[in-house]
Image (spheres, rainbow, N blue to C red):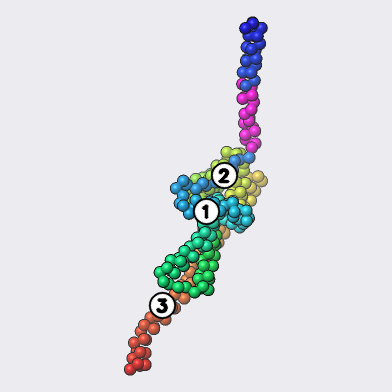
Amino acid sequence: MSPLLAAAAAGAAAGLGLWLVLAVRWARPTLAERLADPPPPRPAPVAGEDAGTLARLGTLGIPLLAGLGLPGPRTRRNLRVCEREAGGYLAEKFTGLLLGLLLPPLLGGLLALSGVALGTAYGTAAWVLFALVAWFAPDLSLRDEADRRRKQMRHTLAGFADLVVVSLAGGAGVNGALSDAAAAGGGWAMSRIRESLREAALLRRPPWTALRELGERFDTPEFSELSASLQLAGADGARIRGSLAAKAKTLRTQFLSEIDAEAQSATERMSLPVVLLFAGFLVLLGYPAMSHILFA
């Protein structure tokens, strides 16, 4: 190999190595570019590997139900409040549909083999009713869970506002009062508030923006009112301790009114069982005397 070719090969290798070093160095985003990028989406909960056979069977119908436009806007809001993924909900719906369509004929066949004959009209009506119940059961369960989480979030927000007022009265600033109030409570709702405030601090964003987004995420409009008051204090320097105290009192009064309304509703629902129990007791006491008079 001639010295000229050796020198050319060495120069090419050196140039290639220098190009690789520069390419690797400048291919990485800078710190400013990384800070300017939007935050990554929250990871969706993934079903565990120990999912049952019915759950794995329900995943087969996810593309079919998604093609039909499910879930709807209201259901998506409930899923966001419950922090659940749409795939698990669609799997439950498809599993309920399969059970509603296949289980009644199977039970009817077993009853026919055992000698119990059911009328066609009654069997069809029971089949349709069971299929409807199995289809709408995931929606009802999701709605109840979302309502409970919204109520708990409003209750936690009332306590959070009280703690912020106490911290402001002690001389803390807005950011310090928010951090102290978020660190003083427990439960999943306070954990979400604490995570949102910590994320806003890391991303150099105002805390009232994080609270407003948290209210939109959990469908709780009371967060928007609280964030508006905090924005006035943080941006315009307004004194908001009195307004926050009034807001906390309003939230507590509203929560106590809801509890009282639920208690009264439960009391009214118990009236019918009590009346039926009393009527049965009267029948039990009066039957011996009436039978003695009528059949003596």
Q: Is residue 38 left or right of residue 121?
A: right
The answer to if 254 sits in the magenta stretch is: no
What residue does disc 1 label? 58
Q: Name above or below for residue 281 compared with residue 113.
A: below
Secondary element at image label 2: loop
Q: Say if the magenta span includes residue 25.
A: yes
Residue 222 appears in the figure: no
Q: Secondary structure at mark 3?
A: helix
Place of residue 181 in the rendered image (x, y in percent of width and height, measured from the top left): 52, 47
Q: Residues within 10 Å of mark 3 (few under 14, many from 20)?
A: few
Left or right: 193, with 15 as reference point: left
**117 to 70, vertically: above or below:** below
Q: Which residues are magenta?
A: 21-37
According to the picture, the residue beneath numbered tag 3 turns out to be 277
- Residue at image position (35%, 89%) is 291
Q: Nearer the viewer, mark 2 or mark 1?
A: 1
Magenta stretch, overall SS: helix
